[in-house]
Structures are given as structure tokens and as C-alpha cells.
Amino acid sequence: MSQPRAASRSIGATAAEGAPGASRGAGILLPLLSGIGGLGLWELAVRGFDLPSYLLPAPSEIAVVMAEKAHLLLDQLQYTAFAAVTGFVIALIIALVLGALIAASPAVERVLYVWLVVFHAIPKVVVAPLLLVWIGFGLKSSIIFVVVFTFFPMLVNTVTGLRSADPDLLLLTRSMGGNAWQTLRTIRLPSAMPSIISGIKISITLAPLGAVIGEFVASNKGLGHMLIQSVGSLEVPTAFAAVVVVSVLGIITWYLAEYVERIAIPWHASQRGRAEE
């Protein structure tokens, strides 16, 4: 009887070892098949209904345009990416500093938080023409628009995270003579990292969107300007090509944020399943 049991345990162990590999394979294969199937249906619909390219270009036509205008797309991408990254970094610094001040001082919260909520409630598209009047035409307007788009989620998550520190650890730190800076560095900030990174993941995908919308109204360069110009001249395949590049930029920034998350908080519960894969 012991041999069949040992054999069954061996088979079970082998199956368990193979399960993660099969899961990883399915995790790659299924999205790939879904994407290919969606593009195929899109192509068939355009060809079958004989839709003109100025209404809906086929994926193959968009790919041809991207190949023909690759240099132009990359040039515009550099401008948009610079505005997105610069604005995001500025917003992150402001959010961390203000978040620390609000979490540390109820007086600062009472003074600032209401104004910040009101500012966030203002539709961003309404602000874009005003930025053109106040700041002028060019890169600065796009950068500030990215800051406006990405700032608030990181601020809210920073305040929430800093306030979620264990009260017992805070009391222990104070009883050992720790000052406010030491408490922030050793207790509050480490406990807030999961929440802060969640805010970063939300905001970082908004950064390219903010840059593109800023370029709609306040720039003569970038993917946003290229998109609006292409639509105005009915070069819809070129507009779709710009949309694809912006989408790829957003996907890259999302996975970059996930990579930072794995490095910054490998101990967090959200990372345990990934570590086993």
C-alpha cells in the first residue's frame, strides 16, 4: 500500500510543480489570442462592410502608416514622453511633501485640503484654455497639465497611507525619544508605501493622457498635436497610429510602475503570489 501512496504523492508533486508554468503560459497565450482575434474581427468588419479609411481604417492600414511615419511618430513621442515624465515627477514630489504635511498637521489639513478637493473637482478640460492664457504656448503648458492630471490621486493615497501606521509602533517610537522625522522615516513611510505606490500606478497612466490633452490646445508638437491635426485633415489612419503610440506609452508606464512596486514592497501581501510564480 505504501508504494501506491508514494507514487500518488510523486504525481501530485509533479503536477503542482508544473502548474505555475502552465499558469504563466496561459497568462501569456490567452491575452495574445484575444488581441489577435480582436484585430482579426476588426479587419474583417472593415473589409466586409467596405468602410472608408476616413471613418474606420483597418489594422493593416494603420500598421502601414506606422511603418511609413515611424520617424515622425518617434519624434513626436519623445516630446510627449518628456512632458509626461517631467510633469509626473513634479506631481509626485508635490504630492509626497503636501501629503506628509497634511498627515502630520491637522491645521494644515484644515487649511489646504478643502482647496485641493475644489481644485480637483474642476473639469481638467476647462482648465486647458486657461493654462494657455496664463502660461503660454509650448512645453510648459503640457507639463503643468500633466501635474494637474496626476497630482490628486497620489496626494490622497499618500495621506491615507501615512495615517495607516500602527498606533502601537508610533507610541513605542515616541516613548523611545524618536522625533517627528525619525517617526516618518522609520514607521509612517514604510507602512504607507503600498498606498503610495497604488496612487503612483493610478496617476502614471494618466500622465500620457494629460500630456496629449495639453498638446491639443497649447502645443505645436507632440502626439496630441499630431492627432488633432490628422483628424482635422481627415488623415484618420495617422490619427489611429498616434493613438496606438500613446496607448503603448501608457502600457509601458504601467508595467514600469509594477516593476517599481515589486522592488519597493516585496514583503507586501500583494506580491507574495507573484514571488511564487
Image (spheres, rainbow, N blue to C red):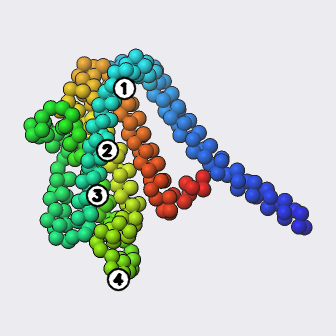
Give whichever of discs 4 and 2 has the lower sequence position: 4
Amino acid at dot 3: Leu
Residue type at the position of mark 1: Leu
Distance between the alpha carbons at the discs numbered 2 and 1? 20 Å
**Disc 1 and disc 4: Cα gap in Å?**
57 Å
The mark closer to the camera, 3 or 4, is 4
Q: Earlier in the sequence, mark 1 or mark 4?
A: 1
Going by the picture, which residue comes out furthest to the bottom? 175
User: Looking at the image, which residue is at 55% across and 54% down?
Assistant: 274
Give the mark toward the camera: 4 or 2. 4
The residue indicated by pointer 2 is: 206
Spatial CA distance of label 3 from label 4 is: 27 Å
> Considering depth in this image, is 19 or 57 the residue closer to the camera?
19
Q: Where is residue 108 in the image (x, y as percent from the top left)?
A: 17, 67
Residue 97 locus on image (x, y percent): 25, 59
- Residue at the location (39% across, 42% down)? 253
Farthest residue to the front: give it: 177
Quarter residue 95 falls in: bottom left
Number of numbered discs on residues: 4
Q: Which residue is drawn at 33% across and 25% down?
A: 75
Query: Is residue 41 shown left or right of residue 160?
Result: right
Q: Which residue is drawn at 26% across and 47% down?
A: 90
Residue corresponding to mark 1 = 74
